[in-house]
Image: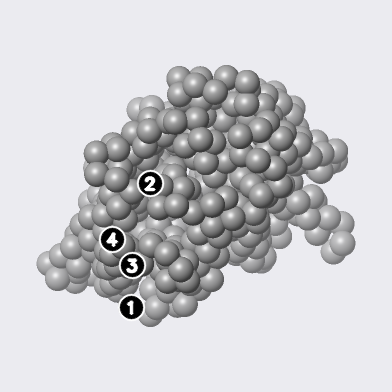
Amino acid sequence: MIASVRPLAALLAGVALLLMGSGLLGTLLAVRGRLEGFDDQTLGLVMSCYFGGFFFGTFLAPRLIQRIGHIRAFAFFAALCAATVALHAVFVTPWAWAGLRLVTGIALVGLYTVIESWLNVQAPPEQRSQVFATYMAVNLAALAAGQWLIGLAPAASFELFTVVTVLICLAALPVTASRMIQPELPAVPRLALVALYRAAPASALGALLAGLAMGGFWGLGAVYATRIGLDVTGVAALMSATIVGGALLQWPIGRLSDGGDRRTTLALVAAAAAVVAGVLLWPAMRSGPALYVLFFVFGGLSFALYPICIAHLLDHLPPEDTLSAGSSLLLLNGVGSALGPALAGMAMAAVGPEALPAFFATTLGLLALIAGGRRLLRRRSLDNAGQFHPMLRTTPAALELLPEVDGDTDPTTPPSATQDARHPGR
């Protein structure tokens, strides 16, 4: 038993260090960018490049991993990520940062793919759901902890970039020192987007709109905090309050989701998140404890949207199709995440910091209308009852840990007669 737990502990330790570094870097770039005089539109575009890199990395990283193996691929991506992080402190220009953020996104998705595919192999079949839940809890805890590291040194210096680089290098130690057998990384077919929409329209549109909102938060949340006058400690508190809310409130929302039509839950949660974002438009709510409480609640509500979309999708597909459909849903969420910071950044440059909560309210209000409209137009029975799993947006490899996913499907054949066999970009 101890022998089976040790590899999981090494992988989780590696991902915790990795996420602490990644969480610190995102906030650091927002604060440092403001100090360097970058406007909101520029910062939004720079942050979008990270999500663009993450998106492209889901196609590029598996090919490299298949060619050179997991351990060497992890070392390769860790070295690439550490180098790009260090170069942020050397070339402090918008164009340089945009290119570096693109490469960082590709490198990080490669690192996550290695870890998550290894978790699939190491997790005992009867504990896969528990391993997935633990992995997501470690993700959220590490992201929240990383926010507070920004107080270790002045944001205008190079020291914090060094801290991120060290964390990424340390993350490589428990993984590259492992003697675990390297797993196979099969190609994951994608459900054609038209077929995905026909199977679960609320899931498809919900994943896209949730990606827009959450991409805006991850890319510009720290920028918003600096624009409303928070110091470095306040920025860390605001970001971590949102993440902690996302970690804690997903559980009760998930239980609510499992108890009825998920479109109702999706509409209610999105509407509530839009209302909270609307309250943030009031100047009186942008200071004091109320600000952090509102972001805590906003995080709890908005972080639950993508998992609800995944669960709704699992409800209406056979097990052999869920991995390909989940991968396509991840694709839509990634597109939204890449567009969100750019759109929100343009709005903030034109209107001011209040444009970010207005962007959240508009996007999530539209999601609530779509989900509620679908619920009123069509009643649906469950084809295969799924389960809500608290999660962050991740790679297709992590979806294989879900107990509803049939991991034995031959990835070289079309998952069903209603699908396109492969996404054309694969």
- Residue in view at x 38 percent, y 46 percent: 216
Q: Would you say the residues marked 4 and 3 are in contact, meaning their CB atoms lie under 8 Å apart?
A: no
Marks 2/3: CA–CA distance: 23 Å
Q: What residue is pinned by disc 3?
A: 284
Mark 1 or 3, closer to the camera: 3
Say left or right for 204 vs 131: left
- Residue in view at x 85 percent, y 64 percent: 1
Of the numbered discs in the image, which one, if any, rests on residue 260? Answer: 1
Kind of residue at badge 2? Gly
Kind of residue at badge 1? Gly
- Residue in view at x 54 percent, y 52 percent: 231
Mark 2 or 4, closer to the camera: 4
How packed mark 1 is, by other alpha carbons closer than 10 Å (few <14, some 14-19, many 20 or more), is: few
Mark 2 or 3, closer to the camera: 3
Question: Regarding mark 4 in the picture, which secondary structure is present there?
Answer: loop
Residue 165: image quadrant is top right
How packed mark 3 is, by other alpha carbons closer than 10 Å (few <14, some 14-19, many 20 or more), is: few
Residue 351 is situated, as x and y percent measured from the top left of the image, at 24, 44
Q: What residue is pinned by disc 2?
A: 216
Mark 4 or 3, closer to the camera: 3
Is residue 22 placed above or below 401 in the rendered structure? above
Most foreground residue, 216 or 113: 216
Marks 2/1: CA–CA distance: 30 Å
Q: What residue is pinned by disc 4?
A: 281
Say left or right for 341 vs 392: left
